[in-house]
């Protein structure tokens, strides 16, 4: 990828751990707080490439911007990090009875309670805040993205990794999009070398599903799609409705009408 390191990248901070362009060092990436800040830098030519988790990328980009490349999918879903004092291998999820767990969304809280009614969940502004509270002893456990599990927790009994088909993440979880100006055809050509074509179909299925969901309900809905070894498509979706958790599943040999059928089964 010749001379790619001469470009200025702007990125959402939490996406940088999954950045696939190894030629780019972190000090060449200017962090921004929101997609709107990202778009502004790109449109004003303060940066040439935007890096954004697909979970928070709007369905419609500002005029003149396009998603040029997608990353590979990095360990979608969530993992519980558990304090030594709260770890209990005899219990479901490896956590003691009555534990207090940090969650960064109402959807996480509802699904966690669906697994274990005795667990107390506490809403945090982000998983990073929850992780700090865990280290300070304010929480017994915290839910973090599976791709962000710290090294000191790996290969210990202080974790429980959820299957994303059972504890369903938001749309696009584990995927990162690279955004550029549409008119910059040379840059778009170069970034295609970082593009993972195998991510496109599942990303399209999940975003089409998200398009069907009223925007006001987006925080209450999750979806995870994948392709098996026989090239069959599978989708799992979840929603919070009147305080209850509802699930839907659909499988098909084709993408035609896939997202619509999954949506119908959930709603």
Image (cartoon, rainbow, N blue to C red):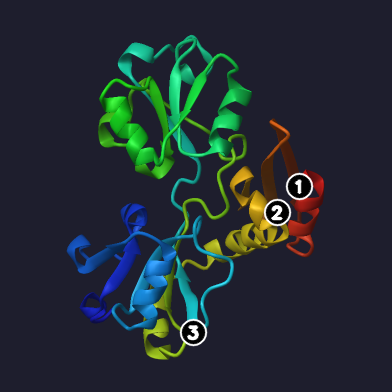
Number of numbered callouts drawn: 3
> What secondary structure is found at the residue carrying circle 1?
strand
In this view, the residue in front, 83 or 215, is: 215
Where is mark 3, residue-wise? 64
Q: Earlier in the sequence, mark 1 or mark 2?
A: 2
The residue positioned 41% from the left and 40% from the top of the image is 125
Badge 3: how crowded within 10 Å, few (<14), some, or many (20+)? few
- Camera-near label (3 vs 2) is 3
Residue 51 point in image, percent of width and height: 38, 66
Q: In the rendered image, which residue does mark 2 sit on?
A: 232
Q: Mark 1 = which residue?
A: 250
- Residue located 45% across and 46% down the image: 75
Note whether 132 is above or below 239 in the view shown: above
At numbered mark 2, what does the secondary structure look like: helix, strand or loop?
loop
- Residue 217 in view, yes or no: yes
Q: Residues within 10 Å of mark 2 (few under 14, many from 20)?
A: few
Q: Residue at x 77, y 65 (%)?
A: 256
Q: Would you place residue 33 above or below residue 151 in this image?
A: below
Residue 124 appears in which quarter of the rendering?
A: top left
**Looking at the picture, how far across and down is residue 207, in whole percent?**
62, 61
Q: CA distance from mark 1 to mark 2?
A: 11 Å
Among numbered discs 1 and 3, the one appearing first in the sequence = 3
């Amino acid at each position: 990828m010749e001379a790619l390191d001469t470009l200025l990248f702007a990125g959402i901070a939490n996406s940088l751990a999954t950045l696939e362009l190894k030629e780019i060092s972190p000090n060449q990436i200017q962090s921004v707080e929101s997609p709107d800040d990202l778009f502004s830098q790109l449109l004003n030519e303060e940066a040439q490439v935007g890096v954004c988790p697909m979970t928070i990328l709007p369905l419609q980009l500002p005029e003149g911007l396009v998603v040029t490349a997608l990353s590979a999918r990095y360990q979608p879903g969530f993992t519980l990090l558990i304090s030594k004092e709260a770890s209990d291998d005899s219990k479901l999820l490896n956590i003691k009875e009555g534990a207090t767990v940090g969650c960064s969304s109402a959807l996480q809280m509802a699904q966690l309670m669906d697994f274990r009614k005795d667990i107390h969940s506490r809403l945090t502004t982000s998983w990073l805040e929850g992780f700090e509270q865990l280290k300070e002893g304010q929480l017994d456990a915290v839910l973090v993205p599976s791709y962000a599990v710290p090294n000191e927790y790996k290969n210990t009994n202080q974790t429980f990794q959820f299957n994303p088909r059972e504890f369903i993440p938001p749309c696009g979880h584990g995927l990162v999009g690279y955004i550029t100006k549409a008119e910059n055809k040379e840059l778009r050509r170069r970034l295609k070398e970082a593009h993972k074509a195998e991510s496109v179909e599942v990303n399209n299925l999940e975003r089409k599903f998200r398009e069907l969901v009223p925007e006001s309900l987006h925080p209450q809905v999750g979806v995870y799609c994948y392709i098996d070894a026989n090239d069959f498509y599978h989708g799992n979706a979840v929603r919070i409705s009147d305080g209850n958790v509802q699930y839907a599943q659909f499988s098909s040999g084709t993408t035609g009408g896939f997202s619509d059928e999954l949506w119908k089964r959930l709603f």
